[in-house]
Amino acid sequence: MESITKEYAVYGSLFLVDEEHYKEFCSYLKKVTFKKSDFFLREGEYCQHLGFLKCGLMRSFYDRDINVNFHLENSLITDYDSVLYGVKSKINIKAIEDSEVFLLHKDHLQSLYHKEAYWQEFGRKIAEAVYLHAKKRIEGLLCISPEQRYHQLLLENPKILQLVAQKHIAGYLGIQPQSLSRIRKRIRGF
């Protein structure tokens, strides 16, 4: 039991699960390693899993360079629309570096929902996290300048700036790479 408690201390917050339900939840997970450039999901596929990124770095994107999100360790990766509604994904999710992911199949998620009210609350927490992240991202794109978005990224996720190609960062910020270069130059000039 002690090893479960230690494990829970490390992964409990990643899974959004309390200690009482941790062991049951883990029985549904499958640990998978994605090498750099491997796809978690390709556009046109049906997303079958919620992924919990243990370590590594991934990006979600449309086409080739319209970056929606960067996923650092201890974050959720999925196309939630595809999981919930059974529609083909419009996004790609790809490993930027070697990454370890715990996968929860959508069928297992549904069976958990039917077991007890706790799991429905768990699903609500996931939906809230997805919604709040999307809301923050949309507000950032609509309400703050590219320079402010860059500053925010610098403060909240400096690792991304070190590990991700500049063209992907520019795409994430909604600007051209040349504009990102000018912003970086201005910031360094301070």
Image: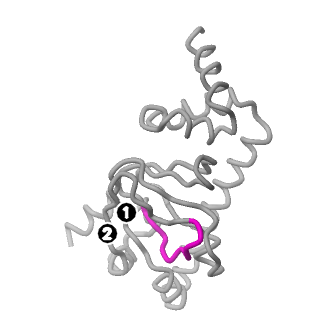
**Viewed as shown, does residue 100 lie left or right of 124?**
left
Q: How far apart are marks 2 and 1 (CA)?
A: 6 Å
Q: Nearer the viewer, residue 43 or 4?
A: 43
| Residue 8 drawn above or below residue 171 | below
Whether 50 is among the magenta residues is: yes
**Viewed as shown, does residue 158 lie left or right of 98?**
right
* Type of secondary structure dominating the magenta stretch: loop
| Residue 153 drawn above or below residue 99 | above
**Viewed as shown, does residue 142 lie left or right of 55?**
right
Q: Which residue is drawn at 75% across and 45% down?
A: 139
Mark 2 residue type: Lys
Mark 1 residue type: Val
For the record, the magenta segment spans 43-52
Q: Residue at x 32, y 64 (%)?
A: 8
| Residue 6 drawn above or below residue 171 | below
Q: Residue at x 37, y 67 (%)?
A: 102
Q: Residue furthest top?
A: 189
| Circle 2: element type | strand
- Label 2–label 1 contact, CB within 8 A: yes
Q: Which residue lies furthest to the right in this view?
A: 143
The residue to which callout 1 is attached is 101
Q: Which of 5 and 110 is in front in this view?
A: 110
Tell me the quarter of the image containing the C terminus: top right
The residue to which callout 2 is attached is 31
Q: Where is residue 126 in the image (x, y as percent from the top left)?
A: 57, 67
| Residue 142 drawn above or below residue 178 | below
* Mark 2: few/some/many CA within 10 Å (<14, 14-19, 20+): some
- Residue 25, numbered circle: none
